[in-house]
Image (cartoon, rainbow, N blue to C red):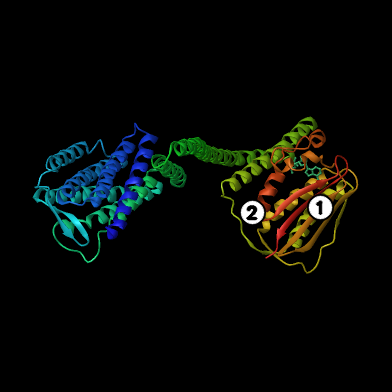
Amino acid sequence: MADLRFHILVYLVLGLVSLSFGLIVYFRDRKNVIHQTFGLLNLGLVIWAFGCVIWLFQTNESSALFWTRVFDVGATLIPVFLLHWILAFLKKDKEKKNIILACYFITAFFLLFSFSSLYIKEVKPMLNFPYWPQAGIVYILYLILAYFGMWLYGLYQLILAHKKSGGNTKMQIKYIIFGTTLGLGGGAANFPLMLGFTLPFPPLNFLILAYPLIFACAMMKHELLGIKVILTEFLVFLVGVLLLTEIFLAPSLKFIIYRSGVLIVFGVISYFLIKSVLKEIKTREQLQELTQKLKKAYTELKKIDLAKSEFISIASHQLRTPLTTIRGYISLLLDGSYGKIDKEIEEALKGVYQNSLRLISLVSDLLDISRIEMGKMFFDFKEISLEDIVDDVIKDIKIIAEKKNLYLKWDKPEGLPKIVGDQQKLHQAILNIIDNAIKYTKEGGVTINIRYQKSGTKDTILFESSDTGAGIRKYELESIFKGFDRGDNIQKTHPDGVGLGLRIAEMIIEAHQGKIWAESEGEGKGSTFYIELPVG
Ligand code: ADP
């Protein structure tokens, strides 16, 4: 008996685990066929495991034979319930209805023999078991058709599904294949002894322990969360059973009342514990669902945004050619190429000419933005010196400042480190900043500076353009970079701008891993624009 203690313990724990998991999973969703068949599978395991416990306690041959036949009823039921569960899990139970039905018929056939000597012939001492069952001819048929036949068919279906599936389902199927192989493989270790062969090692029934556990985990949609509830419920169940046993073993009424009280308190606490775990899971599931929806909406928006950029890009492209032609003709008219024109008409044409220039600039700004947004703007990155670019810009623009009687202070620094950038694009961004500074300044002027900065591991070149002009209100300091956003004060004095230059400048600087920002003390107090670009 002493040697059998380990086996009794294994069967007992297996029975308890199967009972609790079977009940937990079945009652979680009684109408779901996956849960129903999981319940049935565990019923088979419970009959088998508890049958084994009682069998191991038997002290005479005939009662031992009876109990081996009882636990073999459980064993006979397991393959068909397992196959049914696997097919339900793979959502193939409807398609394979006839196969499932045939398997139930085969099982029913074996059950008819379960208490006859054709199924279990006799019991005899094997290893250290005094009454080990010996298989009859029908039992051998069961082994071939049901145990191995249904198991291998289920395995085949699992492998097929594993190949076709992905993500979480693939993971779950892997669990099930692993669990089945471990469980049924462990169970199969009993059979040589039943066929009269002795083994050098005792039966590996303890492996079966892993199998309801692994299955239950695999069944949960969000694996980790599922495990949390199952484990909580399982622990509650086990402690509950222990407390209940204590009540039955109580020596007096006083103890019965006391222990019942403990059980009730435990029941209440457990109820709230499980409820809170379930609530947490629900919240997390809702969150996951929301995230999923958000992701979908984001991709949709991205698609729309791209479509918009594409549309703008095509439209701008188509507009640019006729606009350039119009500007060319007006220019010819103003030059007198088509003959002398009246002063009045000339004035009107000058207006048309100015507006055609504005339109062309707007269209090319739009084209730039849409190209950058679609990732189709080509950047020609090379080693360049920012001070050369600024110098070029100043040469181009100096004349405008002079015309407005504004100073333009710029001392080209020497020996600054080079940066990696696109010469033409950076020219465009800096031109826009200095052009704005001159445009939005009536008196005083603009001071341009460039300096090298070293802060920690980051080496940068800082460009700075300060003017004594219109200034920017605090709340507009960021929005002016967002496109089509112009300062309220500026819109009145300069109605001709569009508000895209800074947006483009920002996109260009960001493509260089740099930063652009503006500072101002407010309206009428001048503004300073900064561009910071990494060195190297
Ligand atoms: P635009 O000059 O065509 O309006 P930008 O994108 O270049 O477009 O500038 C956006 C807005 O930022 C301007 O309308 C103006 O309100 C503000 N801004 C830019 N530079 C200055 C500056 N130096 N001083 C005052 N406001 C400025």
What number is the disc on residue 465? 1
Q: Is any atom of residue 511 visible in this view?
A: yes
Q: Mark 2: which secondary structure?
A: helix
The total number of labels drawn is: 2
Q: Residue at x 79, y 45 (%)?
A: 436
> Taking 160 as reference, is 325 above or below it?
above
> Taking 350 as reference, is 191 above or below it?
below
Q: Amino acid at mark 1?
A: Ser
Q: Quadrant of the C terminus?
A: bottom right
**Relative to the observer, which residue lies in front, 89 or 240?**
240
Q: Earlier in the sequence, mark 2 or mark 1?
A: 1
**Relative to the observer, which residue lies in front, 132 or 320?**
132
Q: CA distance from mark 2 to mark 1?
A: 21 Å
> Taking 431 as reference, is 471 above or below it?
above
Looking at the picture, how far across and down is residue 241, in whole percent? 40, 42
Judge from the rendering whether residue 329 lies leftward or rightward of residue 439; answer left or right. Answer: left
Q: Quadrant of the N terminus?
A: bottom left
Q: Mark 1: which secondary structure?
A: strand
Q: Amino acid at mark 2?
A: Ala
**Relative to the observer, which residue lies in front, 433 or 362?**
433
Crowdedness near tag 2: few (<14), some (14–19) or many (≥20) residues, C-alpha within 10 Å: some
List the single residue furthest toward the bottom. Answer: 415
Task: Tell me which corner region of the image, top left, top right, bottom left or bottom right, holds residue 487.
Answer: top right
Crowdedness near tag 1: few (<14), some (14–19) or many (≥20) residues, C-alpha within 10 Å: many
Residue under circle 2? 511
Task: Tell me which corner region of the image, top left, top right, bottom left or bottom right, holds residue 419.
Answer: bottom right
Judge from the rendering whether residue 486 lies leftward or rightward of residue 512; answer left or right. Answer: right
Looking at the picture, how far across and down is residue 492, in whole percent? 81, 33
Q: Quadrant of ligand 1?
A: top right
List the single residue furthest toward the front. Answer: 252
Q: Is mark 1 within 8 Å of ligand 1?
A: yes
Looking at the picture, how far across and down is residue 381, in whole percent? 62, 60
